[in-house]
Image (cartoon, coloured by chain):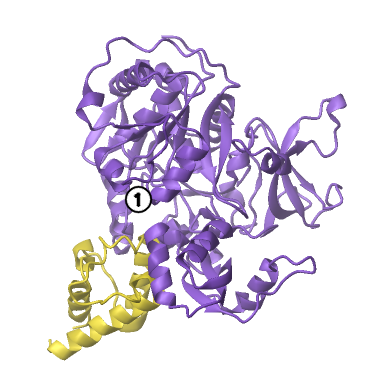
Chain colours: A yellow, B purple
Amino acid sequence: MLASEAETTTGAIAGFLRERFPALANRELTAETPLLGSGAIDSLGILELMTFLADRFGIELTDDDFDPANFDTIGHLARFVERARA
Amino acid sequence: MTGELYLVHHLVERAAPAGERIAVVDRDRQLTYAGLGEAVRQAAARIRAGGIGRGDRVAIFLPKSIEECVAIFAASAAGAVFVPVNALLKPQQVRHIVEDCGARLLLTNAAMAEGLGDALAGLADLSVVAMDGAEWQRPAEEPAPASTAIGEDLAAILYTSGSTGRPKGVMLSHRNLIAGTRIVRTYLGITAEDRILSLLPFSFDYGLNQLLTAVEQRARIVLLTFQFGDEIARAIAREGITGIAGVPTIWAILTRATPSLSKTDLSTLRYITNSGGAVPSETVKRLREKLPATRIFLMYGLTEAFRSTFLPPEEIDRRPTSIGKAIPECEMLVVTADGRRAAPHEPGILVHRGPTVSLGYWNRPDATAEVLRPHPFVPATEGGETVCYSGDLVTMDEDGFLYFVARNDAMIKSSGHRISPTEVEECLMAVGGFAQVAVIGLPDAFAGQKVHAVGVANAPVDAPAVLQAVAERLPPYMVPRAIELVERMPVTPNGKVDYIGLVRERAGDGR
């Protein structure tokens, strides 16, 4: 995986989060930004994030590679997306 | 042990013969019926030892947990009124509830008490007690005397939002809650063999009812706080869940974002119920596909009357958009604006008659008078009783099935939560930059409605900064998705903000 790809994926995820959760719009969102502990994203938000990943990257979230730990940070999520697309 | 059943904690006392059966599962902890009975007696004794007695309000601010279940029944056993507070609420929202109901005791835990900071400062009559603290853990010296309350006494106050103002407390008597338990258990066919998954907060009458029906039947209730649908799927398989109550968002999560569901053994799942908004027909279709052997009950209710209607599962294909018919022991009337019984298919307000009609709003006689009114067609002199006007426009077909048309006011419903525009507007105004703000609900595929703010600025408005500040004061479901600035707020002919017009102009943008 090229670093730039992951950066693009991170950027796309961060862009979605800013758009969907205005409360995050002013925050600096980096690969290290925690997603689950932030308190800004509830279960509905996770549903929308997963729907976004399926629509934007065409990935099927199957049982074997699904692990809530992938949602710890934007960086983890971006790497998960890259792996799922590979 | 007596067989009496007119107070909420009688449900626990009557379950004593079930001794070693498991009552509550809370992650890796569980409590038997014997253990629940003992924990409730101990907690009631401590509540009484703190000087709390009949009619006093006991607020409960705890995560979904064994302690929360114990606190609910213990408050009843102490003769007090329990006031469950949603664990998602922010400190100032908690203060509003505690102050509004004049609670003398707040049962919480150390971590949540710390999270409240100084939000409860100045409430002189209030004691805050952590149930995980050393003082609470000490055995009480003497048992609580038997409650002298009767069924007509107040049992609970459930805070809920309307179209205006801060959340109001709906007063429910013991008889209301016992009737709701009996009625719902009857039509869902709940028995001692059921294992009920509790995802919804006990501050929501629908969630509370799961606890009460489970204990009434000596069934098992499995508590789960979740973020991912996969946690629900795992719980179903691990615990052999037979029944789930959910709101539309939960079904969207299960059918669209729960990859493991198709590999999960769902054969134990006997029924699911929905309330808190209509399930989109696409989601119903997916549920039918994924849960072919599970009975799906679409229901409708409002806290002010606890539960009103359900659609029998066998009708779901024929009438997928119906909210069904009256629950047992109750009658639904459809009443037009000019006070007539509506003709078939003619819209009217749904009016609820029956034993679950609440006692109104705590300390709000005017708001109560709008909702609790005399029977529309039978005068009191001829036996007409007090009924509940729902504020929901519905129609009835020739076969007596009801259909939701619209809310008759500006109340927003998102992911099963009732949201008052006022509460969000007050928060936006406090953050600043606005001359005027109106908050409305716009259609949303997953949430039913999404919160949208329309504002007139009187200073430069940095929308992201404003929303960030709002997110610190309100839980995620109340934070607007967007702030839209306008030059002038549309008003109705009598000078009020035209909420209906604001929604109408924008509803086409909804997903």
| Relative depth, front residue between B236 and B29 | B29
Which of the two residues, B177 or B278, is positioned nearer the viewer here? B177
For the point 36% across and 21% down, which residue is it?
B47
In percent of width and height, residue B77 lies at 43, 19
The picture places residue B83, in percent across and down from the top left corner, at: 46, 35
Give the image quarter of residue B262: bottom left
- Using the image, determine if residue B322 lies above or below residue A56: above
Above or below B145: residue B94:
below
**Residue at horizontal 41 percent and vertical 38 percent from the top:** B122
In the image, what residue type sits under mark 1? Leu
Instruction: Compare residues A71 and B291 and report the one nearer the observer.
Output: A71
Q: Which residue is mark 1?
A: B266
Q: Could one spot residue A21 in this view of the protein?
A: no
Q: Quadrant of residue B405?
A: bottom right
Disc 1 secondary structure class: loop
Query: Residue shown at 82%/53% (left/top)?
Result: B337
Q: How many marks?
A: 1
Q: Is residue B214 left or right of residue B23?
A: right
Residue A51 screen position, x and y as percent: 37, 73
User: Eyeballing the image, is B476 above or below B55?
Assistant: below
- Identified at 59% across, 29% down, the residue is B176
Q: Is residue A78 visible?
A: yes
User: Mark 1 falls within which chain?
Assistant: B
The relative height of residue B328 versus residue B482 in the rendered view (above or below) is: above
